[in-house]
Image (cartoon, rainbow, N blue to C red):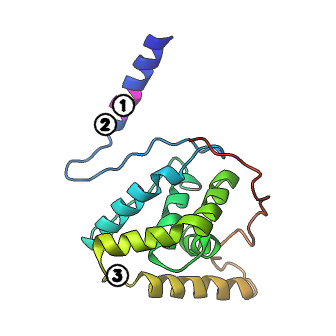
Amino acid sequence: MALEGKSKRKEVNESFQRWLQEGVKYLCIPAADSPSQNLTRHFKESIKFIHECRLRGESCLVHCLAGVSRSVTLVIAYIMTVTDFGWEDALHTVRAGRSCANPNVGFQRQLQEFEKHEVHQYRQWLKEEYGESPLQDAEEAKNILGKYKEQGRMEPQPGARRWSSFPALAPLAYDHYTTET
């Protein structure tokens, strides 16, 4: 069994290596798309990576298998850190550009906890680490969110592109899910 596991891991690693491009920086985070997966332990390194790319004027692609749950959760945590948004407004901001964005219920709970207990420290840390940001994150995010909310109030026009296919968030029972550490 152990040899098969090592063999498969090597094959997956070799397969992944083919996709790596020279001159591109990567931050690979091993995480399952499971409600019990602790993704918050990766928030700081993800936020740091995204922020440094943006400060250098570089693009930053955040992705997972489907681009729906894990990657979205990390981007929401970043948006919450660089703006004064709570997790729901940050999610709606992401949905404005990616309507299928839908973190699993465990990740939603982790974002709720992040908003309630940690985001203020992260905002302070980011400011201490990098100083005042020259980026216009708050203004851009507010504009995007405003357009998203306005579009949600309008009657859909035949053939018009909707900003979101999710009209509301699924309600979560507080403290209903546990996370792996």
Residue type at mark 2 is Gln
| The magenta segment | 11-15
Residue 170: percent from the left, percent from the top?
A: 77, 63
Q: Which mark is residue 26?
A: none
> Are the two marked residues, 3 and 1, in contact with CB atoms closer than 8 angstroms?
no
The residue under the point 75% across, 54% down is: 175
Residue ID for mark 1:
13
- Residue lying at the far left in this picture: please name it: 23
With respect to residue 175, does 131 lie above or below? below
Location of residue 133 (image quadrant): bottom left
Q: Earlier in the sequence, mark 2 or mark 3?
A: 2
Secondary structure of residue under mark 1: helix
Q: Which mark is residue 17?
A: 2
With respect to residue 109, does 121 lie above or below? below
The quadrant in which the C terminus is found is top right
* Magenta stretch secondary structure, dominant: helix
The residue under the point 66% across, 46% down is: 35
